[in-house]
């Protein structure tokens, strides 16, 4: 198991570790649509996790609103590919609530097809592993900083 | 494109044929029998093609023109088509066939090469 893959909620760890190994992705975040990070792989600095989570949550919110205005279901997945790196962002429902996966991959190591293929497995594994009957925990504004600090400490093994 | 795939799948023992983007591993066109996971085959074949290309380059043999993987219950046959882009990415299209183990390899190869010519 990669020492770079860490989880705040342990049920996410094995599916995420498998996904990282199979899809050969460089960075991954599993988070809620509000930006609360459940697990990460490949990040070395807390500030990068915070930025990526905030930006991913913003993209999910803005594309969700765009879909709503177009009277469509929220977008399932979004892919953006540059000359050397690709981004893949997707959401799916679990018993833990809706979760988002942000994956960053290098084009000389992986591909959109591989990431899509193993993302389907990741989503299925996370759905199966998510705590049944769990009510998603709401993070209150008053507790936000403490929750964030606790999560980042867990994610970076402090 | 579908005519090119038709010619491949008409060969006895061929269970399916696909055109796959070599850099993304996504399906462009497919004619597959039930039970073959086209998306998975495409993604994994493209990944393998990229690694084979690098191995061939490292060995100084130039790009591959045809590869054939024989398994107990079938075979995977691939012909890369199209040019390598200037940025060095794999690029191009892969013509992929999934076949029975006792398929006429020569005939499938011929049809794959024809489809590759038609695809570029």
Image: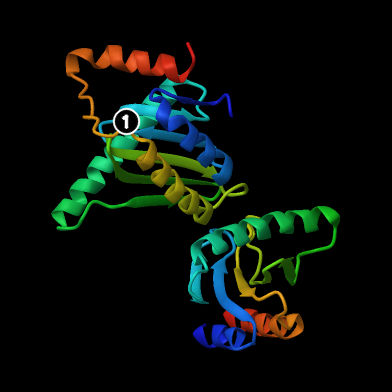
Vertical placement of B75 versus A121: above or below? below
The coloring applied to the image is rainbow
Q: Nearer the viewer, residue A28 or A108?
A: A28
The number of numbered discs placed on residues in the rendered structure image is 1
Can the viewer see residue B120 in this picture? no
Callout 1: 10 Å neighbours few (<14), some, many (20+)?
Answer: some
Vertical placement of A116 versus B10: above or below? above
Q: Nearer the viewer, residue A35 or B120?
A: A35
Residue B13 x/y as whole percent: 64, 82
User: On the rendered structure, is A118 left or right of B63?
Assistant: left
Quadrant showing the N terminus of chain A: top right
In percent of the image, x 20 and y 53: which residue is there?
A67
Q: Nearer the viewer, residue B117 or A93?
A: A93
* Quarter where residue A142 is shown: top left
In percent of the image, x 52 and y 68: which residue is there?
B36
Vertical placement of A121 versus B52: above or below? above
User: On the rendered structure, is B23 left or right of A45?
Assistant: right
**Which chain does the numbered disc 1 sit on?**
A
Can the viewer see residue A152 in this picture? yes
Residue A150 x/y as whole percent: 36, 13
* Quarter where residue A140 is shown: top left
Residue B94 x/y as whole percent: 61, 69
Q: Secondary structure at mark 1?
A: helix
In percent of the image, x 50 and y 84: which residue is there?
B2
Check the image and name the residue furthest to the right: B60
Vertical placement of B78 versus A26: above or below? below
Residue A91 x/y as whole percent: 32, 45
In percent of the image, x 72 and y 86: which residue is there?
B107
User: On the rendered structure, is B47 left or right of A17?
Assistant: right
Residue that numbered label 1 is attached to: A54
* Quarter where residue B103 is shown: bottom right
């Amino acid at each position: 198991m990669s020492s770079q893959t860490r989880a705040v909620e342990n049920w996410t760890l094995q599916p995420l570790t498998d996904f990282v190994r199979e899809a050969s992705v460089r960075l991954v975040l599993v988070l809620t649509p509000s930006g609360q990070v459940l697990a990460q792989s490949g990040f070395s600095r807390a500030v990068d996790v915070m930025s990526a989570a905030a930006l991913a949550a913003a993209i999910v919110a803005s594309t969700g609103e765009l879909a709503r205005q177009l009277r469509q279901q929220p977008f399932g997945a979004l892919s953006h590919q540059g000359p050397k790196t690709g981004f893949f962002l997707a959401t799916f429902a679990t018993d833990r609530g809706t979760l988002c996966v942000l994956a960053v991959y290098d084009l000389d190591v992986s591909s959109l097809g591989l990431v899509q293929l193993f993302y389907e497995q990741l989503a299925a594994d996370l759905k199966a592993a998510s705590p049944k009957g769990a009510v998603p925990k709401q993070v209150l504004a008053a507790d936000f900083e403490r929750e964030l600090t606790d999560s980042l400490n867990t994610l970076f093994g402090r | 494109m579908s005519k090119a795939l038709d010619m491949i799948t008409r060969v006895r023992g061929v269970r399916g044929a696909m055109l796959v983007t070599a850099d993304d591993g996504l399906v462009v066109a497919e004619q597959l029998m039930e039970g073959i996971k086209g998306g998975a085959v495409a993604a994994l074949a493209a990944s393998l093609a990229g690694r084979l290309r690098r191995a061939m380059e490292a060995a100084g043999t130039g790009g591959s023109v045809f590869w054939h993987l024989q398994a107990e219950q079938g075979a995977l046959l691939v012909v890369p088509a199209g040019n390598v882009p200037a940025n060095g990415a794999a690029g191009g299209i892969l013509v992929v066939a999934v076949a029975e183990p006792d398929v006429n390899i020569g005939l499938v190869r011929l049809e794959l090469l024809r489809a590759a010519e038609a695809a570029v």
